[in-house]
Each structure stands twice: as C-alpha cells, then as structure tokens.
Image: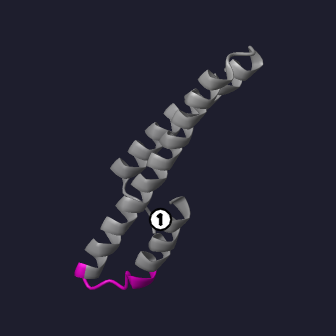
Amino acid sequence: MQLDEPATHEVVRRLRRAEGQLRGVIRMLEEGRDCADVVTQLSAVSHAVDRAGFRLIATGLQQCRDASRDGGAAATDEERLERLFLSLA
C-alpha cells in the first residue's frame, strides 16, 4: 500500500527531526556528557521514531478503511497493518 503525499511528508519531517536528535545524542556521548542527559535525549529520539511509525500505521489503517468502503479488498492490508502496529507497541 502506498501512502498519500501529505502523510508521507509528515512522517519524513518527523524522522528528519529524530535524525537530528540522534546526531545530538552521538555528539553528547563523544563529548562525555552526563549519562542522565544522554538517556533523556535518547528517550526523546525513541519517542519521535515511535510517533512516526504510529503515524504511518494510522494513515495506512485510514486508507484501508476508505478502500473497503469503496469496495476494495483491503482486509489483508488491514491485517498486515495491525501486525505492524503491534510490532511497534
């Protein structure tokens, strides 16, 4: 299933932000920053990546529901997305 353009753009934006945060975490480790500060930032990166994944799944489920209303065979896509969602949880 292909995601629509606005959803893709939003997820890419979230992942680029997480990418910047991850570079910051690496820099903190290289500089010998306090462990608690590093873990706090790493937690923020993890949360950002999770939110991007959940956004992908939510958009996919919405598109599957819309396709099934239009008579498309979206049941297998919906089941696949459900498994993906559970893999993120």
Q: Position of residue 62 (x, y in %)?
A: 31, 66
Residue toward you, 89 or 2: 89
Which residue is painted at 73% across and 22% down in the image? Answer: 29
The number of callouts visible is 1
Q: Are there few (<14), some (14-19), or many (20+) residues within 10 Å of tag 1?
A: some
Residue 78 drawn above or below residue 39? below
Q: Is residue 72 magenta?
A: yes
| Quarter-of-image position of residue 25 | top right
Amino acid type, residue under disc 1 in the picture: Phe
Q: Position of residue 67 (x, y in %)?
A: 30, 76
Which residue is painted at 74% across and 14% down in the image? Answer: 31
Q: Quadrant of the N terminus?
A: bottom left
Left or right: residue 35 compared with residue 61:
right
Which residue is painted at 48% across and 53% down in the image? Answer: 53
Task: Please tell me whether the stretch drawn in magenta is mainly helix, strand or loop.
Answer: loop
Left or right: residue 45 compared with residue 59:
right
Which residue is disc 1 drawn over? 85
Could you tell me which secondary element the residue under label 1 belongs to?
A: helix
| Quarter-of-image position of residue 45 | top right
Q: Is residue 70 magenta?
A: yes
